[in-house]
Amino acid sequence: MNISRLSLIILLSLASQLPATSIAAGPANPASLIAPKQVVAGKTQGEWSSAWWQWARSFDGENNSPVADKTGESCHFKQQGPVWFLAGTYGTQRTIRTCTVPKDKYLYFPLINYMVNSGVPGKISCKGVTEAVREAIDGIHMLILEIDGVRASKLETHRQVSPVCFDAGALTGGRVKLDPSAADGYYVMLKPLSPGKHTINFGGRSNDMSQAVTYTLIVE
């Protein structure tokens, strides 16, 4: 079985900015946060999670991948349509990125996520990869989202699962086939942000994996 690398990174370095919290912490929500069951641009947010993985796996190597990007210079690669994807990380270090985003774009990104695929088409069933990815995400016990200083609450409701198994390599032009794949994790969709500068901190943690990312977004 080929298990994809999670967008993960240690949360400790965020401690000075964001106090430790459980999944259910905090009464407030940023105004831009969209309800997890709301359909955006004709897709459920679970369907957008499959599209996010196809985008993330479409890059040939790590040199030009937004997931491996340490500064944000690759954030605009292969973006199309009304939803702009923000990348997580591979977990090597806390990541701080700056990204210019067109106005009127929704933003979609994982607080923490995982994807499992068979590696060899047909070798492992859709049921098998779905069960494996669910077990990985069941252990998440901390989630963080802060937008322009406003901390989000009830992030546990933002768990999104790919509604059907899919080919995570669909956008590689036939170079890679990752079918069946199944994705699970905690994702958020944001309304288009107002023009100007915005700061987003996000992440998640379990006993085995974690992620912490800061984006400075310039919306114009």
Image: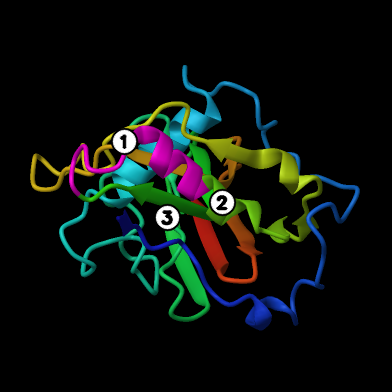
Q: Is residue 32 visible?
A: no
Of the pair 104 and 59, the residue shown nearer to us = 59
Q: How far across and how far down the image is residue 72, in percent?
A: 39, 65
User: What's the distance in space between the residues labelled 2 and 1, CA to CA?
Assistant: 32 Å
Of labels 3 and 2, earlier in sequence is 3
- Up the image or down, 115 lies above or below 141; here it is above
Of labels 1 and 3, earlier in sequence is 1
Residue at image location 42% in from the left, 30% down from the top: 82
Q: Is residue 79 magenta?
A: no
Q: Secondary structure at mark 3?
A: strand
- Up the image or down, 46 lies above or below 14; here it is above
Residue at image location 84% in from the left, 52% down from the top: 24
Q: Is residue 141 left or right of residue 82?
A: right
Q: Is residue 31 visible?
A: yes
Q: Secondary structure at mark 2?
A: helix
Query: Which mark, residue 100?
Result: 3
**Residue 35, quarter of the rendered image:** top right
Q: Residue under label 1, please give it.
A: 80
Which of discs 2 and 1 lies nearer the camera? The answer is: 2
**Residue 177, quarter of the rendered image:** top left
Of the pair 81 and 109, the residue shown nearer to us = 109
Q: Residue under label 2, please give it.
A: 135
Residue at image location 56% in from the left, 45% down from the top: 195
User: What's the distance in space between the residues labelled 3 and 2, CA to CA?
Assistant: 36 Å
Amino acid type assigned to the residue bearing label 1 in the image = Gln
Amino acid type assigned to the residue bearing label 2 in the image = Glu
